[in-house]
Image (cartoon, helix red, strand yellow):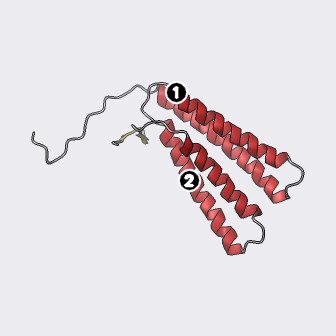
Amino acid sequence: MFEDVEDGFVQERREPRVGTVSGLALMTGATAMAAVGGGHHSVFATILLALLALGMAHAFTVEIQRQAHRRTGRWGRHDVVNTVLLAGWALGALAVAMLPYPPAPMRVLGLLLTFSYAAACAYFVAERRRAVAEPATPVEAPVSESSPV
């Protein structure tokens, strides 16, 4: 797996994947929900869970960038699935926020997750469209120092 840097973004050559974006989105939201509404946590445990959720949010953003900047010249089936799943998680988080029986902190976090998932979906679509619109550049194979010239 070789990578080239163009315009500040790493151009990925690997195959498209669906599970990583969706899985990181769900893990980030679930960890945040555990931090906010996990019952009788100590302050230390709540802070650790919140920091873990922030770290996973960063990994989620990086994976969105990696999937958006793949080297395919078109919008593919995997891109549609990633977009639909992110939009679905935004709707699911909105449903949690609109239910009358969760406590107020859980409802606020549901709204925050709704906006976060919707922003992630819009970011993925914008970055993927930008990557598809860029002209493909030829890639040279790397030359190892031990190979004869």
Instruction: Name the residue located 41 percent from the left edge and 25 percent from the top edge.
Output: 135
Q: Position of residue 45 (x, y in %)?
A: 67, 71
Q: Is residue 88 left or right of residue 5?
A: right
Instruction: Name the residue located 14 percent from the left edge and 48 percent from the top edge.
Output: 146
Which one is in front, 83 or 132? 83
Q: Please state, as top left, top right, bottom left or bottom right, where the C terminus lies in the image.
A: top left
Q: Do the CB atoms of the residues marked 1 and 2 lie less than 8 Å apart?
A: no
Q: Position of residue 78 (x, y in %)?
A: 54, 32
Task: Identify the amino acid type marked 2.
Answer: His
> Which mark sits nearer the N-terminus, 1 or 2?
2
Question: Disc 2 marks which residue?
Answer: 58
Q: Is residue 9 above or below residue 42?
A: above
Secondary structure of residue under mark 2: helix
Which of the two marks, 1 or 2, is nearer to us in this view?
A: 1
Instruction: Name the residue located 42 percent from the left edge and 32 percent from the top edge.
Output: 71
Which quarter of the picture shows residue 18?
Answer: top right
Task: Identify the amino acid type marked 1.
Answer: Gly
Q: Position of residue 24 (x, y in %)?
A: 59, 49
Question: Disc 1 marks which residue?
Answer: 76
